[in-house]
Image (tube, rainbow, N blue to C red):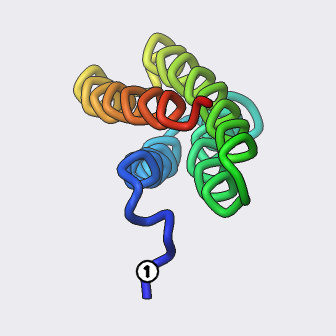
């Protein structure tokens, strides 16, 4: 039986993003394992994790708080991916694909946050 959060489009995109980020950062320079690569992985993982945790909480205010945290991690991921691209770690083609996922995820997260407002 699938978990309740698996039906959320925001979680589906966040999960897709974290899988892509892990795969993408595997080829980054070893010197970045504890730097940008690690930061980007943590930020992207935080998006999906906060969606899951928030959806498991009782009450809209708590859920909304976790979605706001996910939005903060989304912003971090967006910037860190850009930095990785500008440093030459992410090809232009891969960056375009990952940006498309981020753009759709951002829309879903903002929509979810709006739906949880009192």
What residue lies at 66% left-to-right and 45% top-to-bottom? 60
Image coords of residue 62 (percent x, y) = 75, 45
Count of numbered badges drawn on the protein = 1
Circle 1 residue: 2
**Above or below 5: residue 14:** above
Q: Measured from the top left, where is residue 116 in percent x and y?
A: 56, 37
Which residue is located at x 43 percent, y 18 percent? 85
In the displayed structure, would residue 78 be above or below residue 9?
A: above
At which x and y percent is residue 49?
64, 53
The residue closer to the viewer here, 116 or 25, is 116
Residue at coordinates 46% horizontally, 11% vertically from top-left? 86
Disc 1 is placed on an element classified as loop
Is 75 placed above or below 15 here? above
Quarter where residue 31 is shown: top right
Left or right of 39 in this view: 75: left
Q: Specify whether residue 5 is in view.
A: yes
Q: Is residue 109 left or right of residue 37?
A: left
Which quarter of the figure has residue 6?
Answer: bottom left
Front residue of 64/72: it is 64
Looking at the picture, how far across and down is residue 105, in whole percent? 39, 35
Judged left or right of residue 47, residue 92 is left
Q: Residue furthest bottom?
A: 1
- Please identify the quadrant where the N terminus is shown: bottom left
Location of the C terminus by quadrant is top right
Asked if one can make out residue 30 in the rendered structure from this viewpoint, the answer is no
Res 43 quadrant in image: top right
Residue that lies at the very extreme toward the front in this rendered image: 118
**Crowd band around label 1 with a 10 angstrom C-alpha radius: few (<14), some (14–19), many (20+):** few
């Amino acid at each position: 039986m699938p978990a309740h959060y698996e039906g959320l489009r925001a979680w589906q995109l966040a999960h897709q993003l974290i899988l892509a980020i892990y795969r993408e950062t595997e080829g980054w320079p070893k010197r970045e394992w504890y730097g940008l690569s690690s930061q980007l992985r943590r930020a992207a993982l935080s998006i999906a994790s906060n969606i899951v945790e928030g959806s498991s909480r009782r009450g809209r205010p708590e859920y909304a708080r976790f979605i706001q945290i996910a939005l903060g991690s989304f912003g971090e991921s967006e910037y860190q991916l850009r930095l990785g691209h500008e440093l030459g770690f992410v090809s232009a083609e891969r960056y375009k694909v990952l940006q498309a996922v981020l753009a759709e995820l951002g829309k879903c997260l903002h929509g979810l946050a709006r739906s949880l407002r009192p």
